[in-house]
Image: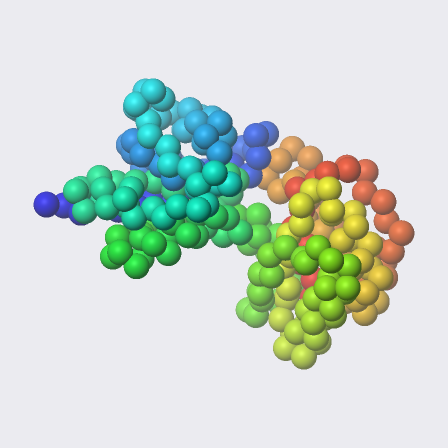
Amino acid sequence: MKTGKLYLIPVKLGLEGRISDIPQHTIDVAIELKSFFVEREKSARAALKEFGLKTSQSDIELFDIGKHGQQQGFDEQLMRCFSGEDLGLLSEAGAPAVADPGSRVVSEAQAMGVEVVPLVGPSSILMALMASGMNGQNFAFQGYVPIQKNERRSFLKRLQSFIERDDQTQILIETPYRVQNLLEELSSHLSPKIQVCLAMNLGLPNEKIEKRSAADWKGEKLREKKPLAVFVIGH
């Protein structure tokens, strides 16, 4: 019997993103599937509808991997692959399993011996790195900055040491309502000559990418209060 696969399916970077950013091959694979791991049902169904899903929405099965599904394992659903069923993993935005709870599903699939197939699509993290002009040969994605003020300061100083010692570009993300605060902290706590690239709302109509020295960001007030942002810092 043919064994099923777990397909990792990127989606647009936001509701106003371009469906043209999703390669046709990715869409062709997605619309043939009937069962998906998803972070939020509403946005997942909207993405599948825009893909042109062949199966009726009422016949689609969605497995919750968000807040309500984090306490459970996914071996029962993944076992379907050994009966020949292909499954999909949808990101909430962009590429699945990168800064995304879908990594747990992929980890379980790998441990069980399920074949994992990553499909092509947008990634705000890589897009921001590409646009920054910083070292793309040596970089680290650090995820979210710690919430506590003292921990944040120590964290940023540690990242600066990676930049200065190893010329390693550092990539950060932050929740939209903390973007302004993080920008202020970067301008205050980093060496003035460290470069900070702020990539906001990538893939959306109001996309904006700007690179300045930490010193030159000081006092900057963003027009948009809650942007979707990726920070790239380095030389």
x and y percentages locating residue 36 in the rendered image: 35, 36
Can residue 108 be seen here? The reply is: yes
Q: Nearer the viewer, residue 225 or 149?
A: 149
Instruction: Give the color scheme: rainbow, by chain, secondary structure or one colour.
Output: rainbow
Report the label total.
Answer: 0
Picture coordinates of residue 25 (x, y %)? Answer: 35, 39
Residue under the point 63% across and 77% down: 166
The residue positioned farthest toward the front in the image shown: 71
Image quarter of residue 221: top right
Q: Residue at x 73, y 61 (%)?
A: 152
**Residue found at the far left of this picture:** 1
Viewer-proximal residue among 126 and 20? 126
Instruction: Give the residue drawn at x 26%, y 56%.
Output: 112
Left or right of 230 on screen, residue 52: left
100 vs 22, nearest the viewer:
100
* Furthest residue toward right: 219
The residue sitting at 31% across, 37% down in the picture is: 29
Is 155 placed left or right of 193 in the picture? left
Q: Quadrant of the N terminus?
A: top left
Q: Quadrant of the C terminus?
A: bottom right
Q: Residue 187 location in percent, x, y?
A: 82, 59
In the rendered image, the residue lying farthest to the bottom is 165
Is residue 71 found left or right of 232 in the rendered image?
left
| Residue 64 percent across, percent down from the top left | 42, 37
Q: Is residue 23 visible?
A: no
In the rendered view, would you say 60 is above or below 223? above
**Image quarter for residue 90?**
top left
**Along the horizontal axis of the image, is 115 left or right of 222?**
left
